[in-house]
């Protein structure tokens, strides 16, 4: 996996001032995870496809890693299989380190996907730590609040979720009442 990344990265133009890929990851988070309905708009899909197909897109290796992870999850779910936790964890560790290297910070989506990957790989304590760290950076993140509540059963968190976010798809999916 790391050798594939090195090949992709060697062909990627790295620019920490170019926020196109960071903004796409953040918008994906806002529309797919933070919004009440988990729905990626056709406009966002078009912008992602445009970035992927444009040879001048900077930091494209980060977007490739995110899309590779997302494709793996989508494909295994569609086939009724369990995702490969080793692949998930390795991909998220690479995406985390590469994103920090380029931008010096992580978008919320990386904390969420990393926590899911670690949880899938039975690394529960590390998943909990990832959620806690993510909430320090993104205290208003509904997905991170949901995972934190599921980990801790914190009553104040439950009240916040059912009072302020009862229509959020994750609150409903996990039947937080």
Image: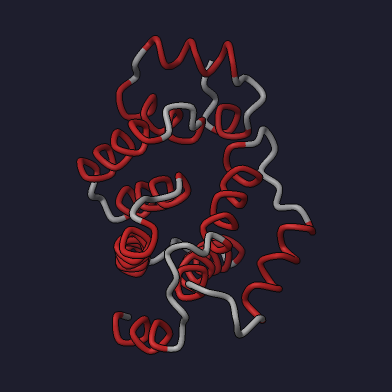
Image coords of residue 100 (percent x, y) = 33, 58
Residue 96 position in % (x across, y down): 34, 59
What's the residue at 60%, 28% (across, down)?
Answer: 172
**Residue name at image x 38 percent, y 28 percent:** 150
Residue 13: where, in percent of width, then height? 47, 80
Q: Could you say which is closer to the camera, residue 60 or residue 147?
A: 60
Quarter-wise, where is residue 93 in the image? Answer: bottom left
Indicate left or right for 145 with 28 as reference: left
Query: Percent x, y for residue 129?
Result: 24, 39
Q: Is residue 131 left or right of residue 52?
A: left
Query: Which quadrant holds the C terminus?
Result: top right
Residue 23: quarter of image: bottom right
Farthest front residue? 17
- Say which residue appears at 43% left-offset and 75% top-offset: 14
Report the residue that reaches farthest toward the right.
42
Identity of the residue drawn at 53% across and 59% down: 19
Q: Is residue 59 visible?
A: yes
Q: Is residue 78 above or below residue 176?
A: below
Q: Is residue 112 above or below residue 81?
A: above
Q: Is residue 45 above or below residue 52?
A: above
Left or right: residue 97 versus residue 29 is left
Q: Which corner quadrant holds the N terminus? A: bottom left
Residue 80 seen in render: no
């Amino acid at each position: 996996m790391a050798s594939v990344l090195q090949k992709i990265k060697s062909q990627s133009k790295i620019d920490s001032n170019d926020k196109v890929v960071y903004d796409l990851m953040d918008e994906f988070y806002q529309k797919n995870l933070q919004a009440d309905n988990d729905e990626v708009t056709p406009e966002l899909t078009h912008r992602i496809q445009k970035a992927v197909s444009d040879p001048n897109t900077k930091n494209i290796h980060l977007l490739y890693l995110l899309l590779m992870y997302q494709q793996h999850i989508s494909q295994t779910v569609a086939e009724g299989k369990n995702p490969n936790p080793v692949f998930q964890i390795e991909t998220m560790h690479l995406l985390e380190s590469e994103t920090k290297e380029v931008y010096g910070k992580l978008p919320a989506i990386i904390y969420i996907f990393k926590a899911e990957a670690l949880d899938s790989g039975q690394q529960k304590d590390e998943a909990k730590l990832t959620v806690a760290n993510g909430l320090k950076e993104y205290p208003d993140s509904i997905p991170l609040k949901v995972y934190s509540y599921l980990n801790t059963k914190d009553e104040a968190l439950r009240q916040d979720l059912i009072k302020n976010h009862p229509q959020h798809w994750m609150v409903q999916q996990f039947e937080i009442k």
